[in-house]
Amino acid sequence: MENKPGKFITFEGPDGSGKTAQLDILVDEFIQAGYPILRTREPGGTPIGDQIRATLLDLKNTEMIDRAEALLYQAARAQLVYEIIQPHLAKGGVVISDRYADSTLAYQGYGHQNTVASLEGIINYATGGLVPDLTILLDLAPEVGLQRRMDAGGFNRLDSYDIDFHHRVRTGYLELVQADPLRWVVVNADRPFGEVQTEIRSILQNYLNNWGY
């Protein structure tokens, strides 16, 4: 890799938007084409983070309070940033993450009706202020996404929140886009998988080319 700053790309979206399935295909394509990409996910991505992930998503943990949930996410995120993301960026590579700090703002902020300001401090502490260069939001109605999750049999603790929670999450994402439009690209995920994939592929290709990869 050339001696140049790395680039950090994140994918966001409600549950069932298809982020992970799209990344399963597209990241492999770009790696095979020679791009210096490292893929990771939240929560998780490290041995410590994966243990925290199991706790966060376990359906049995119904007594978990909002603050504990938010802080556990930051613990997993801090480990991921300093153990995995920052070293790859320092080498000039590209990191693509399935979720990042905007998920905390959307879910633990808007979803749980906590103020964004109350979360920004702990996010900044956990990440050292690392902000993505590009965030791609796969947007769709919560009813559609949750039905997809149920059909796939992948329901977890966050999916079990009521539909109003998920509507607030979607609203949160769209407000985050409005607040920082130069960082975000919104993709309509309520379309056939192949159509969504084609659009994401084009977005990634254009940005990577413009960045000189």
Image (cartoon, helix red, strand yellow):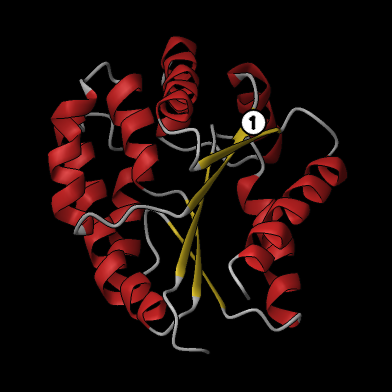
- Residue 26's image quarter? bottom right
Residue 3 versus residue 15: which sits nearer the camera? 3
Give coordinates of residue 14: x percent, y percent.
54, 32
Amino acid type at image mark 1: Met
Q: Is residue 2 above or below residue 125?
A: below
The quadrant of the rendering that contains the C terminus is bottom right
Say left or right for 177 vs 193. left
- Residue 67's image quarter? top left
Q: Which residue is mark 1?
A: 150
Tell me the element at label 1.
helix
Say left or right for 100 vs 40. left
Say left or right for 19 vs 160. right
Looking at the image, which residue is at 31% across and 45% down? 56
Q: Is residue 146 above or below residue 152?
A: above
Looking at the image, which residue is at 27% across and 16% down? 113
Give coordinates of residue 133: x percent, y percent.
46, 55
Give coordinates of residue 204: x percent, y percent.
68, 58
Q: Is residue 181 visible?
A: yes
Looking at the image, which residue is at 19% across and 59% down? 128
Looking at the image, which residue is at 35% across and 54% down? 54
Give coordinates of residue 63: x percent, y percent.
21, 29
Residue 209 versus residue 64: which sits nearer the camera? 209
- Mark 1, other Cα within 10 Å: few <14 / some 14–19 / many ≥20: few
Q: Is residue 36 above or below residue 103?
A: below
Q: Is residue 65 visible?
A: no
